[in-house]
Image (tube, grey):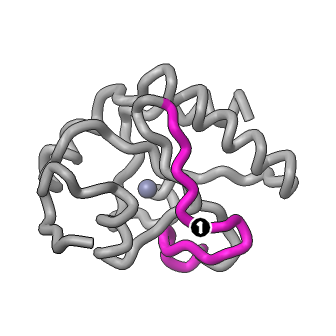
Amino acid sequence: MGEHIEGEPDLHAADFLDKIGLSAHALITPDGNIIHCREDYETAWHAKGFNKDSLGIEFLVPGIHTYGSFMERIKTPYITDEQLKAGLWQIKVWVERYNINNIKRHSELSPGRKFDPGDGFDMNLFIQET
Ligand SMILES: [Zn+2]
């Protein structure tokens, strides 16, 4: 494993998250792949105060972003059709398997600290479809 610095084009999302002390159970790539970073029963570090009893999913935003450009990008729709399909599939699996009835955005769990998934993410659709 080579040394990576933030913003390097070959930096993989899962590695990057680990490097900054974060993780999620699943990352959904724009081409519709699901990257499982943790087993469901393992704790992932994605939502302070809720890590122990929640499953975390992240929808990757294409491109290389600074914090500022990322914040700007998530204001308008960014989820691809393939990503939507894969993400809905994963969430439905979890909802059925664990009888989940509470799906929250990171921005709802950490108001003022986390801002994803942003206005560009159609949360109502995820609530309705799962
Ligand atoms: Zn998030």
Against 9, is 52 above or below?
A: below
Q: Identify the main secondary structure in magenta.
A: loop
Which quadrant holds the N terminus? bottom left
Label 1 crowd bin: few (<14), some (14–19), many (20+), radius 10 Å: some
Range of magenta residues: 32-50
The image quarter containing residue 7 is bottom left
Q: Position of residue 93 (x, y in %)?
A: 77, 44
Name the residue nearer the viewer: 23 or 127: 23
What residue is drawn where x is 66% and y is 75%?
Answer: 42
Please tell me whether residue 108 is drawn above or below residue 92 in the rendered image: below
Is residue 54 shown in magenta?
no
Pick the front one: 1 or 56: 1
Q: Tell me the residue at 86%/52% (across/down).
A: 97
Residue 60 pos. (x, y %): 38, 44
Tell me residue 115's x, y (percent): 35, 54
Residue at 54 percent across and 28 percent down: it is 84
As displayed, is residue 73 above or below residue 70? above
Extreme front residue here?
A: 1
Name the residue tied to disc 1: 38
Quadrant containing the C terminus is: top right
**Type of amino acid under label 1:** Arg
Q: Position of residue 72 (x, y in %)?
A: 19, 40
Left or right: 103, with 1 as reference point: right
